[in-house]
Image: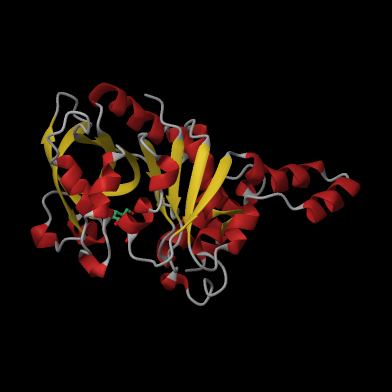
Amino acid sequence: MVVRKAVLPVAGMGTRFLPATKATPKEMLPIVDRPVIQYVVEEAVAAGLSDVLFVTGRAKRALEDHFDYNGELEKMLQERNDLEKLSAVRGPAQLAQIHYARQGTPAGLGHAVLCAKAHVGDETFAVLLGDEIIPAENNVLQQMFSVLATHGGSVLLLKRVPKTEISRYGVAAVKPTTDENIVEITDLVEKPDPADAPSDLAVLGRYVLNPAIFGILENTKPGKGGEIQLTDALKVLANSTDPKVGKVHGLIYEGERFDTGEIFGYMTTVVELATRRSDIGTEFKSWLTNFVKGF
Ligand code: G1P
């Protein structure tokens, strides 16, 4: 089974970054010289996902323009013969087939995924949260597809997190499989109190989902925070006994992940990724070294 479609929910209001996100989508905040969302789309494309659906909302025009052509700017760069910038400007528009669905009311992540139903149809698809960057070279989605090839059903990405951070995530109860990095998911709780967390395995923002999730989401009542939670629907999916729907497995990931969805994570992502750049990295590291000496 080849997964072709990626769904990227990007309708969030970005309240943690106000006032920066008053008129600019949070997914458009730059990490050095590319918006966060471009890293996420590049990761999807590197994993062979050629069809990208953004589930957008109000005030996301900048994001739509970013993944489109800009004739005027391209003409100017062409006239100046600045081919490097021309290619950087055209790049996002050429990455994938980009589509949009609108989430009229921001009623939660589950509701955002449900807005993709008509576009996705009856295919297994991927969901990538637009504020998490996972380096494309870590091949996380490809590894999730290989779990799908072995076990069928749906696949979540899990990471062990300290108790102090567990209430920021969906948390899974699991059963082991013969592979120590792959578990079968038996239950899920959205953002539990640390005392109620069923494990230390947090759900990260990459999902490979059987389309049966849509029918479940249609019947999912608002949960934590009054929102329709994807986690609540995944819990039902995990307990399905329909062989066509399959089970839900989790791939335990120990590699890097950058959470740009809150200010501290955003700042550390900018610094870390800047130090890795081939153009400014060396100079930036040397400046940074001197800078911290002053503390
Ligand atoms: C969402 C999900 C949560 C998941 C998290 C991963 O929460 O609801 O289950 O663990 O993404 O980042 P959010 O961070 O959007 O509040």
Measured along the vertical axis of the image, is residue 186 above or below residue 291?
A: above
In which quadrant of the rendered image does the N terminus lie? top left
Where ligand 1 lies, by image quadrant?
A: bottom left
The residue at 28%/36% (across/down) is 155
Where, by quadrant of the figure, is residue 127 drawn?
Answer: top left
Q: Residue furthest right?
A: 79
Query: Could you tell me residue 121's position as x and y percent?
Result: 39, 39
Q: Is residue 33 visible?
A: no
Closer to us: 233 or 62: 233
Q: Looking at the picture, how far across and down is residue 230, in whole percent?
A: 27, 53
The residue depicted at 35 percent of the width and 34 percent of the height is 124
* Residue shown at the point (57%, 72%) measured from the top left: 23
Tell me which corner region of the image, top left, top right, bottom left or bottom right, holds residue 181: top left
Q: Is residue 88 left or right of residue 252?
A: right
Front residue of 196/5: it is: 5
Q: Is residue 283 above or below residue 103?
A: above
Rendered location of residue 137, percent (x, y):
48, 33
Q: Give the total number of marks visible in the rendering.
A: 0
Q: Is residue 152 above or below residue 255?
A: above
Residue 167 appears left or right of 116: left
Residue beneath the point at 22% across and 29% down: 244
Q: Is residue 175 at least partly visible in the picture?
A: yes
The answer to whether 49 appears left or right of 123 in the picture is: right
Please tell me which residue lies in front, 135 or 272: 135
Drawn side of residue 131 relative to residue 78, left or right: left
Q: How is the image coloured?
A: secondary structure
Residue 210, compared with residue 287, is above or below; it is above
The image shows residue 36 at horizontal and vertical percentages of: 52, 54
Observer-nearest of 160 and 186: 186
